[in-house]
Amino acid sequence: MADLAARLERARAAGVTLESAAAFLQDPEAVAAATADPEAAVAAARSAFSATETIVRGAYSRFPAVSGAGFHSGGADPRSQALYSTLTYVRRAGLYTPDDLEQMEAAGGVTAAWAAVEYLRLTLFVSALEALIVQLESSAIAPGDYAGAVYELARRFGDFPVAS
């Protein structure tokens, strides 16, 4: 588990990209090591996803109202609306959330090993999503483009083949 945490922290620090995540998920040794302890994979994904949920829920305090036509006519910063909808874009793209995976496991529809791989995929996705959130915060990506970028990122992460 310490190795998984260290690898994911290095990935997060290096900025997980589509390419680095795909390479990680296609490396049988890396996937085996990362999913050897399914409970650790669940905990890592839940922690990462929870941190993102906290950021998303705080969107309107993160980006306060702007004054477009003067001091008294403030409207919501479009970045707050885009950020607040992040998890909607993720769900529309079909990427599983921790709650989805937990429900599938509880229903007996999936094995713990399969779920562990999906939790790993989610952890890597959240690390890559953090880079998009930073771009939104710094206005490097427009709020209108953010929705499509999150959707595409989630869709592509969901499509990555995983080594077995």
Image (cartoon, rainbow, N blue to C red):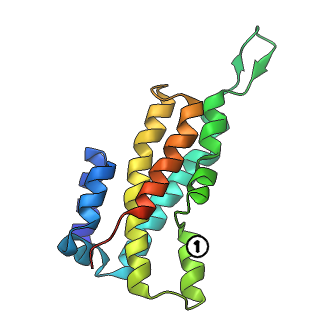
User: On the rendered structure, is 110 left or right of 28?
Assistant: right
In the rendered image, the quadrant that contains the N terminus is bottom left
Measured along the vertical axis of the image, is residue 30 above or below residue 149? below
Indicate the amino acid at tag 1.
Asp
Q: Which residue is mark 1?
A: 100
User: On the rendered structure, is 5 left or right of 64?
Assistant: left
Query: Is any atom of residue 63 visible in this view?
Result: no
Q: Residue furthest top?
A: 70
Q: Residue furthest bottom?
A: 108
Query: Is any atom of residue 50 visible in this view?
Result: yes
Measured along the vertical axis of the image, is residue 20 above or below residue 25? above
Q: Residue furthest left?
A: 29
Q: x and y percent of residue 136 in the render?
A: 50, 32
Residue drawn at (37%, 81%), measured in percent from left and top? 38
Residue drawn at (64%, 43%), measured in percent from left and top? 84
Q: x and y percent of residue 67 in the render?
A: 72, 15
Quadrant of the rendered image containing residue 108? bottom right
Q: x and y percent of residue 14 in the render?
A: 25, 45
Quadrant of the rendered image containing residue 159? bottom left
Q: x and y percent of residue 119 in the render?
A: 43, 70
User: On the rendered structure, is 23 left or right of 105?
Assistant: left
For the residue carrying disc 1, how many other residues have a C-alpha within 10 Å: few (<14), some (14-19), or many (20+)? few
Residue drawn at (55%, 88%), measured in percent from left and top? 109
